[in-house]
Amino acid sequence: MNLAPLPALIGHRGLPSLAPENTAASIQSAVDNGIEWIELDVTMAGDESLVMMHDPDCRLFKQPDIKLAKLNKDALKKIDAGRWFSDEFAGEPLLFCEDMLALVRKTGVGLNLEIKINPDLDTQRQVDLIWAELQSYTEMFDRILISSFSIPALSHLRSLSDVINIGVLFEKVPSNALEITSTLKAASLHCDQSHLSQELALTLSEAMPLYCYTVNDTVTLHKLLSWGVSGVFCDRANADDLKAIVKEHQLTQKA
């Protein structure tokens, strides 16, 4: 396993402060604004289509509360994934995994792909299909990190590959977190910053790279970096005030 270093600011679902999350527009916006790594969500629809979405339903897009497991690719293609964000993005389509990977390859941006297990569908099948999509992109594996809150999903992924980079996601870090990451041969640990203490951050960051979600303000970013956190997932990773905090921290580390 060989993972290129992730930056301190990682685009959360692309660049959702400027474009609708998890879409091609959001990826392109991140790239256009100089963001080196992005995090995106992938989940599965009822016909086993892999779609770039955070939720198991389409309420974000002002659609009826119909579970994703009841929809197929043709139905998903009819959804306007941009109008909810602004009229500027009206007509923006949902992005599918195969098209996302092609765009990531074209742009050269680093990818943290989070597997959002659809609770209405089989976990292993979802992982199998995502892994199958990744087979055509092995030359990018040093810039691809697969993460999930689902330990069973990550365990199955590890059983499929010794080389794919894995990031383990927790909301609140459990006492056996480092045992879990060790078993999975994980490259990184990710957690909710609101549940993190300085003592725990220092302990974890000494063992492996630690990343936190979702951080959009300078005060929290400064605090986390001083605690040893390697980076954060951010809705405005292009912001000058946040980049200034990162630069200040880097200069302090070199001093």
Image: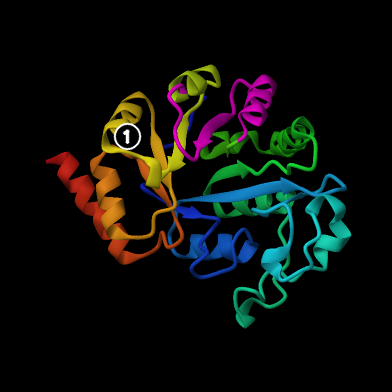
In percent of width and height, residue 185 lies at 52, 21
In percent of width and height, residue 38 lies at 51, 51
Q: Which span of residues is magenta-colored?
A: 150-176
Q: Residue at x 56, y 39 (%)?
A: 144
Q: Residue at x 55, y 31 (%)?
A: 166
- Up-down: is 103 above or below 156? below
Q: Say which amino acid is labelled 1.
A: Ala
Find numbered disc 1 in the image and state the secondary structure of the residue it sits on: helix
The residue tagged 1 is 201
- Up-down: is 221 above or below 63? above
Does the magenta portion include 174?
Answer: yes
Looking at this view, is 91 or 168 the one in front? 168
Q: Residue at x 64, y 76 (%)?
A: 89
In percent of width and height, residue 253 lies at 18, 40
**Dividing the picture into quarters, in which one does residue 78 lie?**
bottom right
Q: Residue at x 80, y 49 (%)?
A: 45
Estimate how packed mark 1 is, as few (under 14), some (14 to 19) or many (20 or more) residues with alpha carbons within 10 Å.
many
Question: Which quarter of the rendering shows the C terminus?
Answer: top left
